[in-house]
Amino acid sequence: MVKRIHTIKGPIEIDALDFILPHEHLFTDLRGPLVADYARGEPAAVIKVVEPYLAEASAAGITALVECSTVGVGRNLSVLRGLAEVTPIHIIAPTGVYRDAYIPETLREISEQDLAELWTTELTEGIEGTSIRAGFIKLAMSDDGPTALEIRNLRAAAMASQNTGAVIASHTIGGKIARKEMDVLEEVGLDLHRFIWIHAQTEPDISILKDAARRGAYVELDSVGAPHQSQAELLETVLALIEAGFASQLLLSHDAGWYNPERADGLPNEGYRGYTALTKDFIPALLQRGITEEQIRLITVDCPANAFAF
Ligand SMILES: [Zn+2]
Protein backbone atom coordinates (compact mmCIF):
# COMPACT_ATOMS: atom_id res chain seq x y z
CA MET A 1 0.00 0.00 0.00
CA VAL A 2 1.28 3.47 -0.89
CA LYS A 3 1.89 5.67 2.13
CA ARG A 4 0.58 9.20 2.03
CA ILE A 5 0.61 12.30 4.16
CA HIS A 6 -2.93 13.17 5.22
CA THR A 7 -3.47 16.91 4.95
CA ILE A 8 -6.41 19.27 5.34
CA LYS A 9 -6.82 19.24 1.54
CA GLY A 10 -6.59 15.46 1.35
CA PRO A 11 -3.95 12.76 1.05
CA ILE A 12 -0.76 13.57 -0.82
CA GLU A 13 2.10 11.40 -2.05
CA ILE A 14 5.34 12.02 -0.22
CA ASP A 15 7.17 12.56 -3.52
CA ALA A 16 5.02 15.65 -4.08
CA LEU A 17 6.45 17.29 -0.98
CA ASP A 18 9.78 18.91 -0.27
CA PHE A 19 10.69 20.72 2.96
CA ILE A 20 8.32 19.78 5.83
CA LEU A 21 8.09 21.52 9.21
CA PRO A 22 7.12 18.75 11.67
CA HIS A 23 6.09 20.90 14.65
CA GLU A 24 4.46 24.32 14.41
CA HIS A 25 1.33 26.09 15.61
CA LEU A 26 -1.28 28.05 13.71
CA PHE A 27 -4.21 28.48 16.09
CA THR A 28 -3.86 27.60 19.78
CA ASP A 29 -6.04 28.13 22.83
CA LEU A 30 -3.88 27.53 25.89
CA ARG A 31 -6.71 28.43 28.28
CA GLY A 32 -7.95 24.88 27.87
CA PRO A 33 -11.39 23.40 27.21
CA LEU A 34 -13.10 24.69 30.37
CA VAL A 35 -13.41 28.34 29.32
CA ALA A 36 -16.76 29.28 27.76
CA ASP A 37 -15.38 30.51 24.43
CA TYR A 38 -12.74 27.78 24.16
CA ALA A 39 -11.15 27.42 20.70
CA ARG A 40 -13.49 29.93 19.15
CA GLY A 41 -11.97 31.71 16.19
CA GLU A 42 -13.06 33.33 12.94
CA PRO A 43 -11.15 31.93 9.96
CA ALA A 44 -10.94 35.39 8.35
CA ALA A 45 -9.40 36.96 11.46
CA VAL A 46 -6.85 34.16 11.78
CA ILE A 47 -5.98 34.29 8.07
CA LYS A 48 -5.29 38.01 8.36
CA VAL A 49 -2.64 37.39 11.05
CA VAL A 50 -1.18 34.03 9.99
CA GLU A 51 -1.22 34.04 6.18
CA PRO A 52 1.73 36.44 5.75
CA TYR A 53 3.90 34.09 7.84
CA LEU A 54 2.82 31.12 5.71
CA ALA A 55 3.61 33.11 2.55
CA GLU A 56 7.06 33.85 3.93
CA ALA A 57 7.60 30.17 4.76
CA SER A 58 6.40 29.09 1.32
CA ALA A 59 8.81 31.54 -0.31
CA ALA A 60 11.57 29.95 1.81
CA GLY A 61 10.73 26.53 0.36
CA ILE A 62 8.41 25.04 2.98
CA THR A 63 5.85 22.73 1.34
CA ALA A 64 4.08 21.27 4.39
CA LEU A 65 3.56 22.18 8.02
CA VAL A 66 2.36 20.02 10.89
CA GLU A 67 -0.13 21.85 13.16
CA CYS A 68 0.53 20.51 16.65
CA SER A 69 -2.34 22.27 18.47
CA THR A 70 -4.30 19.21 19.45
CA VAL A 71 -7.65 18.62 21.16
CA GLY A 72 -7.63 20.46 24.50
CA VAL A 73 -5.46 23.34 23.27
CA GLY A 74 -7.69 24.68 20.55
CA ARG A 75 -7.77 22.43 17.52
CA ASN A 76 -10.16 24.30 15.22
CA LEU A 77 -10.94 22.59 11.96
CA SER A 78 -12.76 25.50 10.28
CA VAL A 79 -9.81 27.79 10.95
CA LEU A 80 -7.40 25.19 9.53
CA ARG A 81 -9.60 24.73 6.44
CA GLY A 82 -9.65 28.49 5.93
CA LEU A 83 -5.88 28.69 6.17
CA ALA A 84 -5.39 25.71 3.85
CA GLU A 85 -7.37 27.56 1.18
CA VAL A 86 -5.11 30.61 1.18
CA THR A 87 -1.67 29.00 1.36
CA PRO A 88 0.21 26.65 -0.95
CA ILE A 89 1.60 24.96 2.18
CA HIS A 90 -0.05 21.64 3.01
CA ILE A 91 -1.35 21.65 6.58
CA ILE A 92 -1.48 18.46 8.63
CA ALA A 93 -3.97 18.34 11.53
CA PRO A 94 -3.74 16.19 14.64
CA THR A 95 -6.01 13.81 16.42
CA GLY A 96 -5.19 12.95 20.06
CA VAL A 97 -5.41 15.10 23.16
CA TYR A 98 -3.21 17.38 25.24
CA ARG A 99 -1.93 16.66 28.75
CA ASP A 100 -4.05 15.70 31.75
CA ALA A 101 -5.12 19.18 32.88
CA TYR A 102 -6.41 19.95 29.35
CA ILE A 103 -8.38 16.78 28.66
CA PRO A 104 -12.01 17.69 27.90
CA GLU A 105 -14.64 16.10 30.16
CA THR A 106 -15.97 13.93 27.33
CA LEU A 107 -12.57 12.29 26.92
CA ARG A 108 -11.87 11.79 30.62
CA GLU A 109 -14.50 9.14 31.18
CA ILE A 110 -14.26 7.04 28.04
CA SER A 111 -12.41 3.74 27.88
CA GLU A 112 -9.06 3.12 26.28
CA GLN A 113 -10.78 1.05 23.60
CA ASP A 114 -13.34 3.75 22.74
CA LEU A 115 -10.66 6.41 22.63
CA ALA A 116 -8.61 4.27 20.24
CA GLU A 117 -11.70 3.89 18.05
CA LEU A 118 -12.37 7.63 18.04
CA TRP A 119 -8.78 8.41 17.04
CA THR A 120 -8.78 5.64 14.42
CA THR A 121 -11.93 7.14 12.90
CA GLU A 122 -10.35 10.59 12.77
CA LEU A 123 -7.29 9.11 11.03
CA THR A 124 -9.17 6.97 8.51
CA GLU A 125 -12.54 8.65 7.91
CA GLY A 126 -12.52 12.22 9.11
CA ILE A 127 -12.64 14.68 11.97
CA GLU A 128 -15.91 15.98 13.45
CA GLY A 129 -18.14 14.55 10.73
CA THR A 130 -16.04 15.92 7.85
CA SER A 131 -13.99 13.91 5.38
CA ILE A 132 -10.83 15.68 6.54
CA ARG A 133 -8.54 13.09 8.07
CA ALA A 134 -6.10 13.70 10.89
CA GLY A 135 -2.50 13.18 9.84
CA PHE A 136 -1.03 11.99 13.15
CA ILE A 137 -1.76 11.49 16.85
CA LYS A 138 -0.61 14.34 19.09
CA LEU A 139 -0.35 13.71 22.82
CA ALA A 140 1.30 15.49 25.74
CA MET A 141 2.69 14.35 29.07
CA SER A 142 2.51 16.40 32.29
CA ASP A 143 5.88 17.59 33.58
CA ASP A 144 5.61 15.02 36.39
CA GLY A 145 3.82 12.49 34.18
CA PRO A 146 2.73 10.29 32.72
CA THR A 147 -0.41 10.43 34.87
CA ALA A 148 -2.92 7.56 34.87
CA LEU A 149 -5.01 9.28 32.20
CA GLU A 150 -1.92 9.98 30.13
CA ILE A 151 -0.97 6.30 30.31
CA ARG A 152 -4.48 5.46 29.09
CA ASN A 153 -3.95 7.97 26.24
CA LEU A 154 -0.62 6.37 25.32
CA ARG A 155 -2.15 2.90 25.21
CA ALA A 156 -5.13 4.13 23.15
CA ALA A 157 -2.77 5.97 20.81
CA ALA A 158 -0.69 2.83 20.36
CA MET A 159 -3.85 0.96 19.38
CA ALA A 160 -4.88 3.69 16.90
CA SER A 161 -1.35 3.75 15.50
CA GLN A 162 -1.33 -0.02 15.10
CA ASN A 163 -4.73 0.18 13.35
CA THR A 164 -3.65 2.87 10.91
CA GLY A 165 0.14 3.24 10.77
CA ALA A 166 -0.10 6.86 11.93
CA VAL A 167 2.72 8.25 14.03
CA ILE A 168 2.32 9.31 17.70
CA ALA A 169 4.00 12.61 18.56
CA SER A 170 4.15 13.43 22.24
CA HIS A 171 5.10 16.64 24.07
CA THR A 172 7.58 15.29 26.61
CA ILE A 173 9.81 17.39 28.85
CA GLY A 174 12.99 15.54 29.78
CA GLY A 175 14.36 12.06 29.26
CA LYS A 176 12.92 10.49 32.39
CA ILE A 177 9.35 10.94 31.17
CA ALA A 178 10.29 9.98 27.61
CA ARG A 179 11.72 6.72 28.86
CA LYS A 180 8.56 5.88 30.87
CA GLU A 181 6.42 6.76 27.92
CA MET A 182 8.38 4.57 25.51
CA ASP A 183 8.14 1.72 28.02
CA VAL A 184 4.35 2.04 28.07
CA LEU A 185 4.19 2.05 24.27
CA GLU A 186 6.52 -0.93 23.91
CA GLU A 187 4.56 -2.88 26.51
CA VAL A 188 1.54 -2.78 24.23
CA GLY A 189 3.67 -3.77 21.26
CA LEU A 190 4.18 -0.46 19.50
CA ASP A 191 7.21 -0.29 17.23
CA LEU A 192 8.90 2.93 18.38
CA HIS A 193 9.51 3.90 14.75
CA ARG A 194 5.94 5.18 15.12
CA PHE A 195 6.84 7.52 17.98
CA ILE A 196 8.17 11.09 17.97
CA TRP A 197 9.70 12.49 21.14
CA ILE A 198 8.62 16.15 20.94
CA HIS A 199 10.81 18.74 22.74
CA ALA A 200 13.72 16.28 23.08
CA GLN A 201 16.03 19.31 23.39
CA THR A 202 14.74 19.70 26.97
CA GLU A 203 16.93 16.73 27.97
CA PRO A 204 20.50 17.97 28.47
CA ASP A 205 22.09 14.50 28.51
CA ILE A 206 22.63 13.67 24.86
CA SER A 207 23.21 9.98 25.60
CA ILE A 208 19.51 9.78 26.57
CA LEU A 209 18.53 11.22 23.18
CA LYS A 210 20.75 8.65 21.49
CA ASP A 211 19.18 5.85 23.55
CA ALA A 212 15.70 6.93 22.41
CA ALA A 213 16.86 6.93 18.78
CA ARG A 214 18.48 3.53 19.28
CA ARG A 215 15.11 2.23 20.50
CA GLY A 216 13.64 3.46 17.20
CA ALA A 217 12.05 6.79 18.15
CA TYR A 218 12.27 10.00 16.20
CA VAL A 219 14.04 12.68 18.21
CA GLU A 220 12.50 16.09 17.59
CA LEU A 221 14.44 19.28 18.31
CA ASP A 222 11.80 21.94 17.88
CA SER A 223 13.20 25.13 19.37
CA VAL A 224 14.94 26.46 16.27
CA GLY A 225 14.88 30.26 16.44
CA ALA A 226 13.21 30.27 19.87
CA PRO A 227 14.37 33.12 22.11
CA HIS A 228 14.48 30.82 25.18
CA GLN A 229 16.84 28.38 23.45
CA SER A 230 20.59 28.79 22.94
CA GLN A 231 20.92 28.17 19.20
CA ALA A 232 24.62 27.34 19.63
CA GLU A 233 23.74 24.53 22.06
CA LEU A 234 20.97 23.28 19.81
CA LEU A 235 23.41 23.19 16.91
CA GLU A 236 25.84 21.06 18.92
CA THR A 237 23.03 18.62 19.81
CA VAL A 238 22.07 18.27 16.14
CA LEU A 239 25.70 17.73 15.13
CA ALA A 240 26.20 15.10 17.83
CA LEU A 241 23.09 13.16 16.74
CA ILE A 242 24.13 13.27 13.07
CA GLU A 243 27.63 12.19 14.06
CA ALA A 244 26.13 9.23 15.96
CA GLY A 245 24.30 8.14 12.80
CA PHE A 246 20.77 9.29 13.65
CA ALA A 247 20.17 11.84 10.86
CA SER A 248 17.28 9.74 9.55
CA GLN A 249 15.51 9.96 12.93
CA LEU A 250 16.06 13.65 13.52
CA LEU A 251 13.28 16.23 13.19
CA LEU A 252 13.84 19.99 13.27
CA SER A 253 11.17 22.64 13.73
CA HIS A 254 10.40 26.02 15.33
CA ASP A 255 7.37 25.30 17.55
CA ALA A 256 6.40 28.79 16.41
CA GLY A 257 3.23 30.66 15.48
CA TRP A 258 0.46 30.52 18.08
CA TYR A 259 -2.44 32.74 16.93
CA ASN A 260 -3.99 33.60 20.27
CA PRO A 261 -7.81 33.83 20.38
CA GLU A 262 -7.63 35.42 23.83
CA ARG A 263 -6.50 38.72 22.35
CA ALA A 264 -8.38 40.93 19.93
CA ASP A 265 -5.33 41.24 17.68
CA GLY A 266 -4.77 37.47 17.78
CA LEU A 267 -1.12 37.83 18.68
CA PRO A 268 0.67 35.76 21.29
CA ASN A 269 1.89 37.95 24.17
CA GLU A 270 5.52 37.60 23.09
CA GLY A 271 4.66 38.40 19.44
CA TYR A 272 4.11 36.09 16.47
CA ARG A 273 7.23 34.14 15.60
CA GLY A 274 7.38 32.98 11.98
CA TYR A 275 8.58 29.77 10.36
CA THR A 276 11.85 30.67 8.62
CA ALA A 277 14.66 30.61 11.22
CA LEU A 278 15.51 27.08 10.09
CA THR A 279 16.00 27.98 6.43
CA LYS A 280 17.48 31.42 7.08
CA ASP A 281 19.84 30.80 9.99
CA PHE A 282 20.02 27.26 11.31
CA ILE A 283 20.63 25.31 8.10
CA PRO A 284 23.31 27.74 6.91
CA ALA A 285 24.99 27.26 10.31
CA LEU A 286 24.85 23.45 9.88
CA LEU A 287 26.32 23.71 6.37
CA GLN A 288 29.10 25.85 7.74
CA ARG A 289 29.92 23.08 10.20
CA GLY A 290 30.35 20.55 7.39
CA ILE A 291 26.89 19.02 7.20
CA THR A 292 26.12 18.25 3.54
CA GLU A 293 23.14 19.33 1.44
CA GLU A 294 22.22 15.63 1.21
CA GLN A 295 22.10 15.31 5.00
CA ILE A 296 19.99 18.47 5.22
CA ARG A 297 17.58 17.00 2.70
CA LEU A 298 17.42 13.77 4.67
CA ILE A 299 16.54 15.64 7.87
CA THR A 300 14.11 18.22 6.44
CA VAL A 301 12.40 16.26 3.65
CA ASP A 302 12.76 12.48 3.91
CA CYS A 303 12.71 12.16 7.67
CA PRO A 304 9.44 14.07 8.31
CA ALA A 305 7.88 12.44 5.21
CA ASN A 306 8.71 8.99 6.55
CA ALA A 307 7.55 9.91 10.05
CA PHE A 308 4.13 11.26 9.00
CA ALA A 309 3.26 9.04 6.02
CA PHE A 310 0.90 6.15 6.56
ZN1 LIG B 1 4.29 22.87 20.23
Image: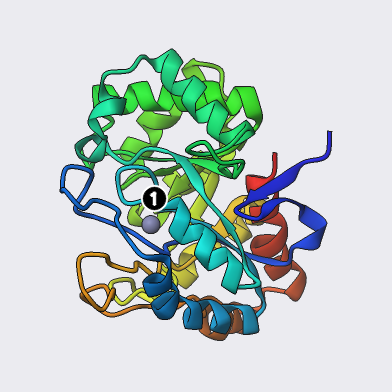
Query: How far from the left and from the top, in percent, is residue 245?
Result: 66, 53
Q: Is residue 2 above or below residue 275?
A: above
Q: Residue at x 62, y 78 (%)?
A: 58
Q: What type is the residue that disc 1 sits on?
A: Arg
Q: Is residue 296 above or below residue 206?
A: below
Q: Residue at x 39, y 50 (%)?
A: 75
Query: How far from the left and from the top, in percent, is residue 153?
Result: 38, 26
- Determine whether, in the image, residue 278 is placed left or right of residue 16: left
Q: Quadrant of residue 84?
A: bottom right
Query: How far from the left and from the top, in percent, is residue 55?
Result: 57, 81
Q: Quadrant of residue 41?
A: bottom left
Q: Name the residue that disc number 1 marks.
A: 75
Question: Ligand 1 appears in which quadrant?
Answer: bottom left
- Determine whether, in the image, residue 95 is placed left or right of residue 55: left
Q: Is residue 279 above or below residue 111?
A: below
Q: How is the image coloured?
A: rainbow
The answer to whether mark 1 is within 8 Å of ligand 1 is no
Q: Secondary structure at mark 1?
A: loop
Q: Residue at x 19, y 53 (%)?
A: 31
- Determine whether, in the image, residue 198 is placed left or right of residue 125: left
Please tell me which residue lies in front, 49 or 288: 49
